[in-house]
Amino acid sequence: MLLMYPPRAKHDPPRFWRFFRRGMLLRCPECGISPVFIPVKKVRSIYDWFTPLDGCPRCGYAYAREDGYFLLAVWGINYGIVAGLGTLAGLLIQSRYNPGLWSPLWLLLLPVPMLSFLLARHAKSLFLAMDHYFDPHAALTHDEHDQPHHG
């Protein structure tokens, strides 16, 4: 006997810019509504600033991962942006104003660590969003559990 099932609902393919925007806004990569981090006004320690919440209270998407998960976010995204902008700023200062050799170093000594501190949350949120874009962790719907596997 041939079983007939209704056709599966087609899901829209993930859109890169949707996930990028959610990451830059520090929002849940799945629903785009709940925050990934504690709001800035409620931050009481460095730990609060750098550590994402456990997960999304609205859709249940887990933000907290295994140890070392955000290492690439910190080293790749955050360090890459900060080092790139610092190098560009140093070269621009050097070529435009032609100061001594150590002047660009002193001009960048405070802004570069501050930029790194401010971008840490965005780097982690963006990494979480891009991970979800390239490897979605969507749960199976009720209909997908009920359908037999052919193979």
Image (cartoon, rainbow, N blue to C red):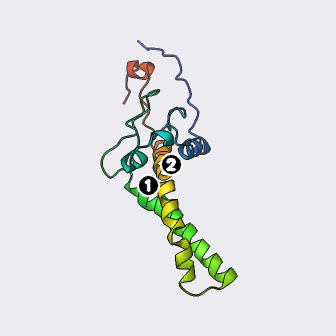
Q: Amino acid at mark 2?
A: Leu
- Percent coordinates x, y for residue 43 in the rendering: 44, 43
Q: Amino acid at mark 1?
A: Ala
**Is the residue marked by circle 2 packed among few (<14), some (14-19), or many (20+) residues within 10 Å?**
many
The residue that label 1 is drawn on is: 73
| Residue at 56% across, 81% down | 103
**Is the residue marked by circle 1 packed among few (<14), some (14-19), or many (20+) residues within 10 Å?**
many
Local SS, label 2 = helix
In front of the other: 94 or 45: 45
| Residue at 36% across, 48% down | 47
Q: Using the image, determine if residue 41 lies above or below residue 109.
A: above
- The N terminus sits in image quarter: top left
- Percent coordinates x, y for residue 33 in the rendering: 54, 32
Q: How many marks?
A: 2
Q: Label 1, label 2: how many angstroms apart (C-alpha)? A: 8 Å
The residue that label 2 is drawn on is: 126
Visible residue check, residue 39: no
